[in-house]
Image: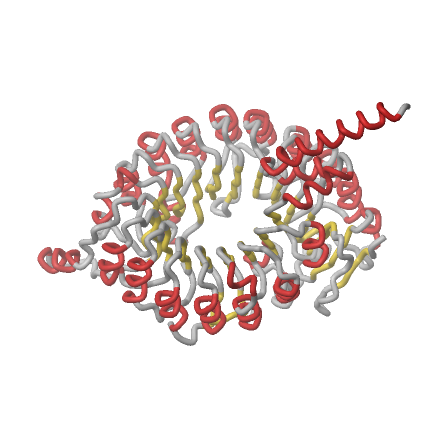
Amino acid sequence: MNFISTCAISKARSYNNTVWECVIPYIQEPQDRAAISLVCKSWYEIDAITRKHITIALCYTTTADLLLRRFPHLESLKLKGQPRAVMFSLVPNEWGGYVTPWIKEIVESSSRIKALHFRRMIVKDSDLELLATSETGKGLEVLKLDYCRGFSTDGLLHISRFCRSIKTLFMEECTILENDGEWLHELALKNTVLENLNFYLTDLVKISSEDLELIARKCASLVSMKISDCDTSDLCGFFQSATSLEEFGGGSFSALPEQVDEGVLNEQLKRYSIAFPPRLCRLGLTFLGKTEMPIVFSIASRLRKLDLLYAMLDTEGHCLLLQRCPNLEILAARIVIGDRGLEVLAQFCKRMKRLKFERGDENEEAEGVISHKGLIALSRGCIELEHLSLYVSDITNASLKCVGTYLKNLQNFRLVLIEKQQKFADFPLDNGVRSLLMGCHKLRRFALCLRPGGLTDVGLSYIGRYSPKVRWMLLHYVGESDKGILEFSKGCPSLRKLEMSACCFSERALAVAVLRLTSLRYLWVTNYRITASGGNLIHMVRPNWITELIPATQAPVHNVNGEVLAHILAYYSLAGQRTDLPSTMRHLILNI
């Protein structure tokens, strides 16, 4: 090759790199980015300097130092700590998931990070103080503490006092020790750029409606406010001032006696004669009852999102409200909505995109539950659904087939069969599950929690075969033997996160399945068949594959054969075995 040819090739490579430097920043999907970085060294370096956001699915899979050296210009970080099972008390309280080393490294490295999202992590007041008083804190625009614990309002006071640029402060479902309400007052005095404030489903009660109103007056860009229990009648001034507000959640209503004079009732309702902001289209009023429901009627036609999980409505109340919401796209409610409520949704809410139905108490379930009939009506009426999560009292193959036939845009499907009856006439559900998966080509997340006998080994093999794009999966009471999980593991080429419970599978079968699932990065198994030594798990060994044994947090659990059941967590880690493993847990497999 002569000198001219060498120069031409060098110039062409330089031109291509310049083009990709312009193109790569517009590629946002993490999987695409990861694939690009593997092509060549120059693309690897371009990805490193242009990556702005990273999500770490488990905080022990890497370290803050490794991450910030790999992506020095990172602006946004989402970090998850404890396993999802902590929400159901299935892991020890001392499991781990501390945010401290991450905050220290972010602060010491003078990181450019403007947005931090910590989920299911232990956050201390000292962590918040260190962050707030650092250079990173001065430029911090987003802080999300999602289902976190370990801090108090003293830590929040530091954030309010020093983080003057913060636009989003999120603490939904956090366990917060409340000393006073000074943090909110300080936020109201110091901040003028706040857009989102969320302390919904927390125990913060020392909340001043005057501070909320001051925030609304000073922060012209405030679009979302979700609060804890605060009498809605005290928020009239807030609603008048929050002219840009699009979302509100929380509040409360004073309880009215069941039998009350009509004059007294009208007088009581006058307290809640709220003039909602003109842009409000996402609403979730806590403890909303049938008596107060007319408050919502005036804006029902423009609502796009409605949270009724903590409303005090019966089946009829849900129906009366939902038939007035033709533009609704997102709904969360309890299963007391019943089949009749789902039929109303199918008839009146054709634009529905996301539906979530949770369990209530036993008294509610005596009044109304969701069955296969409601699921069929919903599938036929709300064909634009992308996310569907529900608890059902019974289920049939025909109803699952109906989901696959009509819901072609479905990306997330979660179904839990409740323990309302002992026998199900249409078990097993093998053919229904196959039809659902074959019909829903866009499915990325899939959860199926059944009862014993709900899915045979054949049905489990169908899940593996017909889930080519599913990346996260939760399975409960599926399969009959090791053959089922082994057949399942021959498929699922995109599966990265697998959670299973009430398993009948042996350690050896689990180990072989993990080896076959080549994309798998995270495994959680609860109540599998454990041996005394756990030695059969050695077969799942991979480079950087960490396996932790977690004992049952309650009394020892046995299956019908008298075999001991336990919990296991396995994941890939670039950081090796963690050093803060509790004494009640142990590593089963060493890093190789």
Residue that lies at the very extreme toward the front in this rendered image: 4
Residue 374 x %, y %: 40, 34
The correct choice, above or below, for 327 with respect to 474 in the image is: above
**Which residue occupies 39% across, 73% down?**
182
Which of the 4 quarters of the picture holds residue 554?
bottom right
Which of the 4 quarters of the picture holds residue 463?
top right
Q: Can residue 172 be seen here?
A: no
195 left or right of 488 in image? left
> Which residue is nearer to you in this view: 390 or 12?
12
**Which residue occupies 72% across, 43% down?**
45
Residue 577 x %, y %: 77, 59
511 left or right of 337 in image? right
The N terminus, quarter of image: top right
Residue 190 x %, y %: 38, 66
> Which residue is nearer to you in this view: 231 or 320?
231
Residue that lies at the very extreme toward the left in this rendered image: 263
